[in-house]
Image (spheres, rainbow, N blue to C red):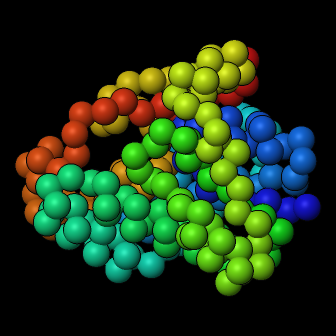
Amino acid sequence: MELALLYSGGKDSSLAALLLDEFYDVRLVTAHFGVTDDFQHAREAAAELGFPFETVTLDESVAEDAVEQMVDDGFPRNGIQRVHDHALETVAALAVDAIADGSRRDDRVPTVSRAAAQSLEDRHSVDYIAPLSGFGRHAVDDLVAANLAVETGPSETVPKADYEGELRAILADRHGDDAVDEVFPDHEQTYVHGRR
């Protein structure tokens, strides 16, 4: 069965790929807006892990709306959730049996409610799978440490292919570099360099 996994090149989506590989023909899919070439980081990580990779292009108006939501809120949560929902819809439209992401039980964002998952499944005739939904951060970190070679560091310095890089670029273009610092709190990112 074919499964498309939303993929950033980070530890969570990489671990999700390893867990699902036993049961599905996993294809790693990075959703992007074409604003930056950050998707290349995910392509490289996918190659290191040995999974097929592709990209899907998202509607840039969704990114623009998400950025304005972030500015209005003063934090990125709702904007990132908006983009993730759009990415899941886009990937669900692919010719696959199932879609998945690397969301964990204790993630603040993005999240997928039971109702949203059921709606995706019903409207697109796919299964939605969140293989890490029963795992907390500590359990994920333990599994990652045992199985993946990971770089960890500040979001601004670690290669990544999640939505954040492009949203930061759009935010800086529309509202200036200071707006990025005001909206995005300091946090760490991960990037997978391969298996252990």
Q: Single out the residue that lies furthest toward the bottom.
A: 123
Which of 66 and 117 lies nearest the eye of the viewer? 117
Q: Is residue 112 visible?
A: yes
Which of 53 and 109 lies nearest the eye of the viewer? 109
Which of 61 and 104 lies nearest the eye of the viewer? 104
Which of 130 and 65 lies nearest the eye of the viewer? 130
Residue 80 x %, y %: 37, 59
Residue for point 83% across, 68% down:
97
Quarter of the figure that contains the C terminus = top right
Residue 17 x %, y %: 73, 43
Q: Is residue 128 left or right of residue 60?
A: right
Q: Residue 89's image quarter?
A: bottom right
Q: Single out the residue that lies furthest toward the front.
A: 115
Residue for point 56% across, 47% down:
103
What is the tally of numbered marks visible in this picture? Answer: 0
Q: Residue 14's image quarter?
A: top right
Residue 3 x %, y %: 79, 60
Quarter of the figure that contains the N terminus = bottom right
Residue for point 81% across, 52% down:
26
Residue for point 77% across, 79% down:
125
Q: Is residue 13 visible?
A: no
Q: Is residue 125 left or right of residue 77?
A: right
Note whether 53 is above or below 55 in the view shown.
above
Q: Is residue 124 left or right of residue 13?
A: right
Residue 15 x %, y %: 68, 35
